Amino acid sequence: MTALRQYLGVWRLPGGRILLSVGILARLGIGMTPLALLLLVQQTTGSYSAAGLTAGVYAIAGAAVSPIAGRLADRIGPAPILLATAVLHPLALIGLVLATSLPWIFVAAAVAGATYPPLTAAIRRGWNNMTAAGSGRHHLRGAALAAETSLFELVFVLGPLLVSALVVITHRPATALLAAAIATFVGTAWISRLPVMRRRQRNESDHAAKGLGPLTAGGFPALMICVVALGTAFGAAGVIVPAYAGHHGGGDGLSGVLLGIWGVGSAIGGIWFGTRRPAMALARQFAWLLGAVAVSFLILTVMPSPLYLGMALVLGGVTIAPALTVGNTLVGRLAPAAMLNEAYTWTVTVSVGGSAAGGAIAGAIVDRPGGLPWAFVFAGGVLLVAALVAAVPSGSIARADRRAEERLRQQLTTEPA
């Protein structure tokens, strides 16, 4: 019952039910657009190579521009940025549908990627603001971020399923891309109207982001190394699991099922973790959870069949959302309040970069004879290194976390009962 009360408390926060429900609708494009774009360009050009390159242009443009959008959101508030991108991004997707030559397809893909709304950063900052120390709701922050992280997994499950359904029904990938545009427009415009998004954060000008912004904050660069490692492992898994399915005669259908149940395991783990209040310092929690995710990858090397791999993915997936939840919590603790939108967009940028690198390296390993198990070892090894970075007691993450904990205790002494 205590767990239920925590999540009911999150649901009842001002704007909480909109962030939880409409937040999924608004971000369906994250799960839909890459696949729909790939299918559309392949249908238009007849080339998978061109389709893959276009998807890369889309992802890189988004990763490069995301921190800039985050910094603007920190300075003028999230609402204007969300409204502008809610219009520009769907228009760019319409341009992709209309483009017929490869150069214009690349241009439209770059614009679409660069104008994707910084929704995840804005939503996570919104949860931080609603559960700030002194608000009387700080005890709900863990549950709020766990619910956000776990429900976000649905985007990666529902998005591809919707694309597949629309393509089967209409035989036109453009339909799926337009559906993603509509979902992004409606959801983003709706969220931008929430008071927590329209409220401009008041911070001293000395704390405003300059230069590298949050990347200069104590512990934040080391934290980004850990986030890169997670992105690398997940990008590798996106190649390894389909390769494993193909090796065992399952094909694309089996790979989709395996990745889907991995996400289900993650969501279950995240919901459960959100009700816990471990006494262990966040940096140590993060280190242990990264290690647990690493071990889950290493265990996959000895799974003899897709059935056993699926069981291991469900069990291993339970560790993923908790690791991401603690990582997101650390972002909110280590980054200055005046840079929080930008800080969360940096997690997206480095994750995308890590994912691209992980997929490329894993692909090269898988292509070698007997390389499939070693690809799992590669992903697990990267995560073990990240766990060691977070685990060092005198490391920058641990030191910054201790300072943040001291500040929080001082602030909580003034929090209303």
Image (tube, rainbow, N blue to C red):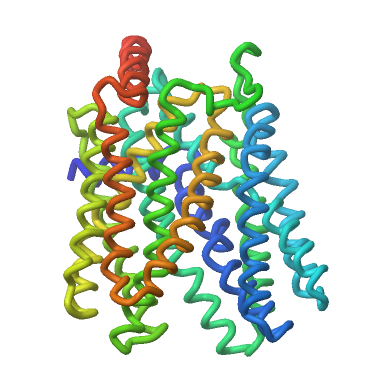
Q: Could you tell whether 93 is left or right of 132 in the image?
A: right
Judging depth in this view, the residue of 106 and 39 nearest the camera is: 106
Residue at the spot 37% in from the left edge and 55% down from the top edge = 233
Relative vertical location of residue 233 with respect to residue 244 in this rendering, above or below: above
Q: Indicate the quadrant where residue 206 lies.
A: top right
Residue 6 or residue 296, whichever sits in front? 296
Residue 26: image location, x then y, percent: 57, 56
Q: At 17% across and 77% down in the image, what residue appears?
A: 304
Looking at the image, how many numbered discs can be counted on the residues?
0
**Which residue: 48% across, 63% down?**
360
Vertical arrangement, residue 248 with respect to residue 414, above or below: below
* Rendering coords of residue 384 (x, y %): 27, 45
Q: Quadrant of the C terminus?
A: top left
The image position of residue 382, as x and y in percent, is 33, 49
Task: Give the side of residue 25 with respect to residue 388, left or right.
Answer: right
Q: In the image, is residue 70 above or below residue 102?
A: above
Residue sitting nearer the eye, 188 or 313:
313
Q: Is residue 136 left or right of residue 206?
A: left
Depicted 58 relative to depicted 363: above or below: above
The quadrant holding residue 244 is: bottom left
Residue name at image x 33 percent, y 77 percent? 369
Direction front: furthest residue:
369
Q: Nearer the viewer, residue 283 or 144?
A: 283
**The N terminus is located in which quarter?**
top left
